[in-house]
Amino acid sequence: AHEYFSEALNLARQLGSQDLEVQSLTSLGVTHSASDQQKAFDYYSEALARLSGLKQPSREAYLLNGLGGLYWQKGEPQQALTSHQKALALHTSIGDRRGEAGTLLQIARILRSLGETDRALEYLNRSLTLHRAIGYRLGETEALTLLGATYLSSDKPQEAITYFQQVLEIARE
């Protein structure tokens, strides 16, 4: 895949197509995200820089979330949080409710790891509400599971059970 996307990147540059260049850089970032985080980071960063002027907030949000994930893997939670919050603002501004709901989950995970339980719960509840509103069951179960885990780690087992039971009910459907 790397060779294919590298060739596509070279062709996009020869043609002067900024849009295809961003697409190729993004694809290269995705292909490297599991094996070489620094290369993935570099590709995402370059794609984000090339996006300026193209007015594609959905793509920008996708790249910001990708960078947030890489920052998280590098052990830089504050940078990850900043990147995801920028993505959240973009998803919200364009009405991308699924992107917004997923990004809320990412932010909640980071806040939870930083010990900011109340804020994490706030983001999780917002995510749950959005996932339910759009009918995205996988996202709903992710939010419910993380809500349950957050309450469980906060020594509130009864609240945790409530959320875990909802996950079980969805699994049985």
Image (tube, rainbow, N blue to C red):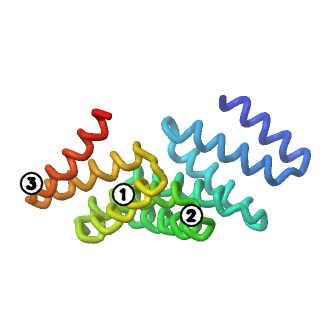
Check disc 2 and report its element: helix, strand or loop. Answer: helix
Q: Which residue is mark 1?
A: 128
Q: Are marks 1 and 3 in contact (CB under 8 Å)?
A: no
- Mark before the other along the chain sequence, 1 or 3: 1
Check disc 3 and report its element: helix, strand or loop. Answer: helix
Camera-near label (1 vs 2) is 1
Question: Real-space Cα distance between discs 1 and 3?
Answer: 19 Å
Specify whether 16 is left or right of 119: right
- Mark before the other along the chain sequence, 2 or 3: 2
Q: Residue at x 45, y 47 (%)?
A: 136
Q: Residues within 10 Å of mark 3 (few under 14, many from 20)?
A: some
Q: Which residue is mark 2?
A: 91
Q: Residue at x 72, y 60 (%)?
A: 51
User: Which quadrant of the view contains residue 45?
Assistant: bottom right
- Mark before the other along the chain sequence, 1 or 2: 2
Whether residue 151 is visible to the viewer of this picture, yes or no, is yes
Question: Real-space Cα distance between discs 2 and 3?
Answer: 33 Å
Q: Is residue 44 above or below residue 6?
A: below
Where residue 166 sits: x, y (%)? 24, 46
Q: Are marks 1 and 2 in contact (CB under 8 Å)?
A: no
The label shown at residue 157 is: 3
Q: Is residue 120 above or below residue 153?
A: below
